[in-house]
Amino acid sequence: MTTANRQKTRVITNTKLITLSALFAAMTFVLTAFVHIPTLKGYVHIGDAVIFLAASLLPKPYAMASAAIGASLSDALSGYWIWVPATLVIKALTAFAFTSKSQKIICKRNIIVLIPALVLCVVGYGLYSGLVIYGSLGAGFIDAPANAFQSVASAAVYIILSLTIDRSGIKKKLS
C-alpha cells in the first residue's frame, strides 16, 4: 500500500470514528434529556445504556468523548448546569472501563464492568452533590437509590441491545 493510500484509509477511519462518536453522543443526549423520570435532585434515564454500548464499540478516547459530551450536553440543556462538571468526569470514566477489543459486545469484561459503573454513578454523584452542592455527605446520597436504579435499568437495556447487535453481526461491519 502506498503512503497516499494509507493516508486516505486513515482519514476514512478517523472520519468514521468521529461520526460514530457524534452519533452516540447525540443518542446519549436524546435518551438522557428527553426520556427521563424526574427525581428529588435531577432525573433518572437510560442514556447510560448508549454510553455502555459506545464504549463497547469505539476505541477508548472516542467512547469517553462521546459519553462526556452527550451526557453533559443533556445536563446543560435540561437546566442542570450544576451537574455538568461531575457528569463530564463520571461518564468519561464509565466509558473507560469497557472494552471494544472483543469480537462480541457481550463479553465477560463488559458484563463485569457494569457493577463498577453502577458504583461509580452512585458514589460519584453522591460525593459531588454532598461535597460541592450541599456541603453534607448525607444529603449527597439522598438520590443514591435513584442513581442505582438508573444504572441497573441502563445495564438491562444495554444487554438487550448488545445481544441483538451481536446476533446481527453489525460490530464486524463497523470495524
Image: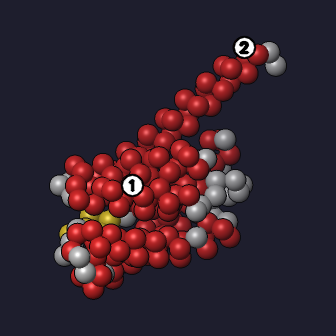
Check disc 2 and give the amino acid type. Answer: Ala
Q: Identify residue for label 1.
A: 88
Is residue 104 or residue 38 the one in the foreground? 38
Can I make out residue 35 in this image?
no
**Helix, strand or loop status at disc 1:** helix
- Identify which residue is drawn at 37% across, 64% down: 46
Q: CA distance from mark 2 to mark 1?
A: 37 Å
**Helix, strand or loop status at disc 2:** helix
Indicate the position of residue 60 as horizontal and vertical percent values.
Answer: 59, 50
- In the shown orientation, is residue 105 left or right of residue 79? right
Give the mark, 2 or 1, whose residue is nearer the N terminus: 2
Indicate the position of residue 102 as horizontal and vertical percent values.
Answer: 71, 57
Residue 129's disc number: none
Indicate the position of residue 64 as horizontal and vertical percent values.
Answer: 50, 51
- Give the quarter of the figure containing the N terminus: top right
Q: Residues within 10 Å of mark 1 (few under 14, many from 20)?
A: many
Mark 2, mark 1: which one is toward the viewer?
1
- Give the quarter of the figure containing the C terminus: top right
Where is 94 relative to 74, above or below?
A: below
- Identify which residue is drawn at 47% across, 56% down: 92
Q: Identify residue for label 2.
A: 4
Where is 86 relative to 147, above or below?
A: above
